[in-house]
Amino acid sequence: MSDLSNLATKRLDTPLLLSANQALARGAIEAGVAFVTGYPGTPSTYVIEALLTVPDLGFKVEWSINEKVAFEVATGVSWAGLRSLVTMKMSGLNVASDAVASVQYSGTNGGLVLYVADDPNTYYGMVEQDSRHYARLAVAPMLTPSSPQETLDFLRRAFDISEEIGRPVMILLTTALANTSEMVTLGDIQSIKRQPGFNFDIDRYAKAGPAACVQQHLDTVASLEKFGELTDDLNPLTLSGSRVGIIAAGITWNYLRDVVQAHGLDPCTLKLGVAHPLPKEKIRNLLDRVDTVVVLEELDPLVEETVLALRGEVGHPVRVIGKQSGHLSLAGDYNVDVVSSVLLPLFPDQAPASGHVENFSSQAQALKVRRLVTFCSGCPHRASYHALNQAIEQLGYRKSDVIITGDIGCTILGMNEPFQSCWTEICMGSSISLAQGFKYAGIDKPVIATIGDGTFLHAGIPALINAAHNKCNLTVLILDNHWASMTGMQPNPGTEIFAAAQSKQLINAEEIVRAAGVREIRRANPYQIKKAIAMLKEAISTPEISVVFLEAECAIQKKRRIPGGGHLNVKPEKCVGLDACGPNCIKLLGCPALERGAEGKAFINPQACTACGLCHHVCPHGAI
Amino acid sequence: MTQFSLALSGLGGQGIMTVSQILAAAAGREGVRVLLFEGTGISQRGGGVFGFVRLGDFSNPKIPLNGAEALISLELSEVASIFAFLKPGGEVWINAARIPGYYSKLRPELYPPEGKILDLIRLKTPRVRFIPADRLAREAGSAQAVNMAMLGAFIRRNPLFSKESLIWAIEESNKKFAEKNTNAFRRGFDFVQTEETPE
């Protein structure tokens, strides 16, 4: 990441290269926030990551235990009159949604903005969720900027309008925007000094009684309408005289602009900077002037449905081109090629159909080297899954006998080759509850849940309490590497180094497990492979719920803190060669540091090796 | 300046994003409009990385199919992942080094031979340069600086910005490794002038 230590500089006359995520970080500084929190979820992660690199911010920035808690803490700050920003990815909004729906009805005092990042085309895994549905569901205003500059400008507006209408405002980016950088012109930093305070008003801040709740609902609807009026300029309508109109939501506006510019087209356009509420009057005005309208929006056809509903109100037939007409897909993200494919046929004079130019993508795909998404060199999880598979085998089970439920984070990579341990992945914390369900269904063989330490603290605790309380015979493996590594090594409340450095209370997951009534608790270092296997065998054989902590620090974090550490070597005179060796070290472990060297023998890349010793353990010839 | 789109590919940790940001910083210094796109995915765990750099009057950072003036790949076979974006007749710059994956370590025949990759590229363009960037980076004193050597080689033939702006951007991007990185950049730059590679 580029150096952002000047992100909080009061005035910068020259533009700064910022991604939309970094622009949000700057926007929070400019808007005079008192508090920023969130939970790591890529691509939303980099807002807080950027803020944490800035010295002397003058306000509090922290990772929260989960998204719901983050939103609730921020709500408290806001109800006390100060500004706060909350960040999360779409899966996190699902977690926070209970609080989000409720707070929207009560409203806010200090500005409260919720940034959510959707991931159409799943650059980072998980579902292609369209979070605009949450704006409708919660009667919440939502902004959808199209560029990093707009992201900064919209965030400042969002804080001002949040206070003007007294409601939280959502701002939605997609991966393609969150990871786009451009030169961004910065604004002034507002200095907001407010005394915190809060008034007793249960009609607003509680949900006690139908009369108050219905009134809260009516007030929320009214505030949404007011938001629409205040943000009318974010939905610019340009009537060119063309009989073709384009409605472009969020980032799709930029694809449209590039296509329009490249081919010299002049359609009527409506750019939507607001996802909710939609500017119905402007949509009507556009429909009045055109015979064909193209709706550009990624994922679900929310704008398109509104357009189809409004189409009947104009006096002439209007053809609507979008997802329901079969022209555009419900899945994936858009780009210039997608937009060209629907737009150019509507302008045969300006963009005559040229012959198809082959891009040879299938020939290129055929040559692509298939790569395994797996654990880093020296990762303790590799040792843990190796030990787990060994323990299952040594207990006399077949691999297909033992269901292992996986969870979110690096630990899920145990589903891939060479381990193929984890069978399932739902959402944060679900490995334990799903495993309970398998036992309830009557699976009589062992059922094992694996979960990382951060994921356990985020959402695994209630599931563990449920399983322990109901005396369900599960084995839960907490793969404790101290960091949220999949999202870039954020700390969690159990990260000892972080808690000590920041004078925070260290949270001991083992004490939580004990407090849940689990009696069978074990702790092993996965690199001490024989001990770990023995301990796992005991835990799996125990006729009651048991928890095993397989604990060793994330290898990347450890190497950053303690460089060096040495590496192992292969003794070529002992190595029989990869092709002659039964299941060889690469096949068994998939460690990136293990390579095919001279004469087909194993070779250890000294730069990548962390000397974890796992390959030494599996080599049958004592060659490592 | 006129429009220029560059697509980059490689593996996690090779420094694709650093090259993109250096180009963007140089663009900023020379007042050229620039857009970057980072396709990192879960690259840290062994996957590929791609990046787009677009200079000039563009509104969106994603390069269309057949839309890139040039490709830079920091790994031989990874050029395949961005090949569809290459404009017919465009330039291809490849680090000649191979980094096999899990499957191609077990079965080396799964890694495509250089000839097949060359055949693929020639479907669109004769303008391809293989650069021994691993060696150039090592000679510059930093095995990590493969990305800088590739950038230097590319810039020699595509003077999008002054050498001075690029050296400044390289130094700004990482002060600790400034000397090794600029050395590797210069090695790449000079290599294209002094040695001929298959064209």
Image (cartoon, rainbow, N blue to C red):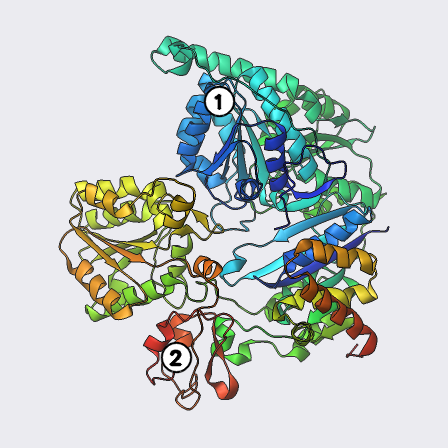
Residue A140 visible: yes
Looking at the image, residue B116 lies above or below residue A303: below
* Residue A596 rendering spot, x and y as whole percentages: 49, 80
* Residue A323 rendering spot, x and y as whole percentages: 60, 39
Q: Which mark is on residue A78?
A: 1
Q: Residue at x 61, y 65 (%)?
A: A365
Residue A304 visible: no
Q: In which quadrant of the rendered view does residue A151 lie?
A: top right
Q: Give the quarter of the figure containing the C terminus of chain A.
A: bottom left
Q: Is residue A567 left or right of residue A157?
A: left
Few, some or many C-alpha atoms within 10 Å of disc 2 (few <14, some 14-19, many ≥20)? Answer: many
Chain letter of disc 1 in the image? A
Of callouts 2 and 1, which one flags the residue occurring earlier in the amino acid sequence?
A: 1
Few, some or many C-alpha atoms within 10 Å of disc 1 (few <14, some 14-19, many ≥20)? Answer: many
* Residue A552 rendering spot, x and y as whole percentages: 35, 59
Q: Residue furthest bottom?
A: A573
Secondary structure under the numbered disc 1 in the rendered image: helix
Nearest to the observer: residue A28 or residue A107:
A28
Q: Which residue is mark 2?
A: A584
Q: Are marks 2 and 1 on the same chain?
A: yes
> Mark 2 or 1, which is nearer the eye?
1
Looking at the image, residue A537 lies above or below residue A462: below
Q: Is residue A573 left or right of residue A314?
A: left
Secondary structure under the numbered disc 2 in the rendered image: loop
Q: Is residue A451 left or right of residue A358?
A: left
* Type of amino acid at the residue the image marks with label 2: Asn
Disc 2 and disc 1: Cα gap in Å? 58 Å
Nearest to the observer: residue A590 or residue A430:
A590
Q: Residue furthest top?
A: A211
* Type of amino acid at the residue the image marks with label 1: Ser
